[in-house]
Amino acid sequence: MSAHGKIDTKELALAVTFTALYVVFGAVAISPIIGLPGKAITAATILAPVMGIIFGPYISVLSTFLGGIIGISIGYFSPLSFVSGIAAALCSGLTSKGRRIISIIVYVLVFLLLAFFPVVGPAWLFMPYLWFQIIGFIILISPLQSTAIKNFDSNSGSRLLYAFFVTSLTSTLAGQLAGSATYELIVYPDSVGATGTWVATAFLYPIERVIIAIGSALIGATLLKVLKTANLLPSLNRSHR
């Protein structure tokens, strides 16, 4: 943002562009949502963490919210994808801008909501479902994430890829937590159906989220270099690290 804390024309144009890209990515299905026939996880899931890292939490949340509304209105997004994208953008934006404590709090709150949701929560039905989300939390509070945050300022391609991968992984898991909690609202109180979903996806969603993080890292690291070279990030990417 500008020195006066207001979004300038250049930043507004970038935000609008990314909102449109988010909608377009939402048209590309990459994985079905088990338990919700006809619904899919879309490529917008890859873009959400990137938007958070580039724009920070506020603009990225606004962009994913508006893009999600548009996506739902034209049938691209499910409620799960809508909520998941906002959560991922929020956490990646907070983490990359040095507000990791707030990101950790958000992660823990959504984790507890998912785990202990009445009747259909995996803590009651199938605790092993939560194993990779716990690993995500450990990464988020560990030196792995601290190093990633520092590497956003690096000119090294490998370090920048590392920064995007780790931050995208923890934030896309936050998005997955939020999406799964939304799923609980939809299927409640069908504990049989929820159990089937937790069992079926316990070892599938970790693979899915790692692939998403890899995609986010490849796109994000390249995009950040391009924007820096074009001098499009003088204040928009200013951090509090």
Image (cartoon, rainbow, N blue to C red):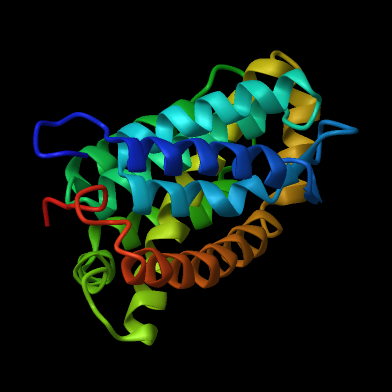
The quarter holding residue 182 reads top right
* 143 left or right, relative to 162: left
Quarter residue 155 falls in: bottom left
Q: Is residue 196 left or right of residue 178?
A: right
Q: Percent from the top left, x then y, of residue 203?
A: 68, 59
Q: Is residue 81 or residue 25 the one in the foreground?
A: 25
Relative to the observer, which residue lies in front, 71 or 18? Answer: 18
Q: Residue furthest right?
A: 38
Considering every residue shown, the one lying at the far top of the view is: 189
Can you say whether 212 is above or below 126 in the image? below
Residue 20 position, x and y percent, is: 61, 38
What residue is drawn where x is 71% and y is 43%? 24
Q: Is residue 232 left or right of residue 24?
A: left
Q: x%, y% of residue 44?
A: 63, 46
Q: Quadrant of the N terminus?
A: top left
Residue that appears at 34% across and 72% down: 229
Q: Residue at x 28, y 56 (%)?
A: 233
> Residue 126 versus residue 235: which sits nearer the camera?
235
| Quarter residue 135 falls in | bottom left
Q: Is residue 223 above or below residue 118?
A: below
Residue 99 in view: yes
Question: For the C terminus, which image quadrant?
Answer: bottom left
How many marks the image carries: the answer is: 0
Image location (x, y in percent) of residue 181: 56, 28
Indicate whether 61 appears above or below 18. Answer: above
Asked whether residue 135 is in view, the answer is no
